[in-house]
Image: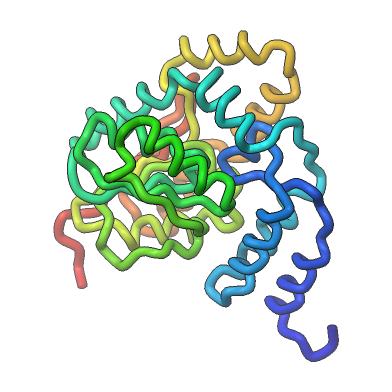
Amino acid sequence: MKGQSKKQEEADDFGKVSFPKLPCPECFRDGVQGTKKSWASAQNLARQPSRVVVVRAITKRYKTMSYTMNAAEFNEKIMKGHFRKIYPVIAAQIVERTGVRSGRCVDLGGGPGMLGVCLAKITSLTVTVVDLMPECVELARENSAEAGVAERVDVVQGVAEALPFDDASIDLVVSRGSIFFWEDQQKGLAEVYRVLRPGGWAWIGGGFGTAELLREIEAAKADDPEWNRKRRERMTQNPPEHFRAILERLGIDGVVEHQEAGTWIIFRKPAEVEA
């Protein structure tokens, strides 16, 4: 519309997109439905000036997708089914590598919050699951209660590019799978670095814990060749050198580890950061 800013036009365009289903970021990568409520909630979030980036991300991500199960089904059949073994393994790997066992943790783009829940179970961390979609926020609450860690796991709606946390307030940020769908990966990683306390760690990327678990999941998904094709496509579009270049541009001293089981961006904020 004439006279409108680009961001306002994007927000209006978002409101015109008519899809009956919209998944949470965690659920999206495996083809899962959300609900009309998600669209309304995401639209309200997107109209906040600091989060208008959601408009571009959501519109781009979901225009060409179709989905086969809703978020609750995904939680039961995938997160607690095919993927149930990988989250305890990844959580243990994170704790062993970083040594972070207490303080505040963020599970970014965590969907139903399985990684955050697993971390809460093996540490004394207080975990906040951040996800865009209200269905996933509710599922994360349910999963933490079911695991007996609800008193140390909370949830908040949000996006990577505008994290709702103060500077230097988080000891550990983890994220499995969502970075491939961030609208602005560099801005998201900059936000992760901003919220980390001096000495805090980030463990961002996508993986299956071990090569053996990956092969087990591939066998279980053998009747769904599209799943494996999309997984490989995401990795091709986001090679390790791509993430290394982002870290270099941001001046973050970190590593990008790529193995058969997945790719992880790992960094620690210096204990003493120059003002």
Say above or below: 111 vs 263: below
Relative image position of residue 71 (x, y in whole percent) = 63, 37
Q: Position of residue 229 (x, y in %)?
A: 71, 25
Of 202 and 120, the residue lying toward us: 120
Q: Residue, x 53% and y 27% (percent of image)? A: 79
The residue depicted at 81 percent of the width and 52 percent of the height is: 19
Q: Is residue 105 left or right of residue 81?
A: left
Left or right: residue 250 versus residue 139 is left
- Specify the quadrant that holds the N terminus: bottom right
Rendering coords of residue 200 (x, y %): 24, 50
Q: Is residue 61 left or right of residue 198?
A: right
Residue 226's place in the image compared with 172, above or below, is: above
Q: Closest to the observer: 140 or 115? A: 140
Q: Nearer the viewer, residue 230 or 48?
A: 48
Kindly tell me whether residue 268 is visible in this rendering: no
Residue 7: image quadrant is bottom right
262 sits left or right of 38 in the view: left
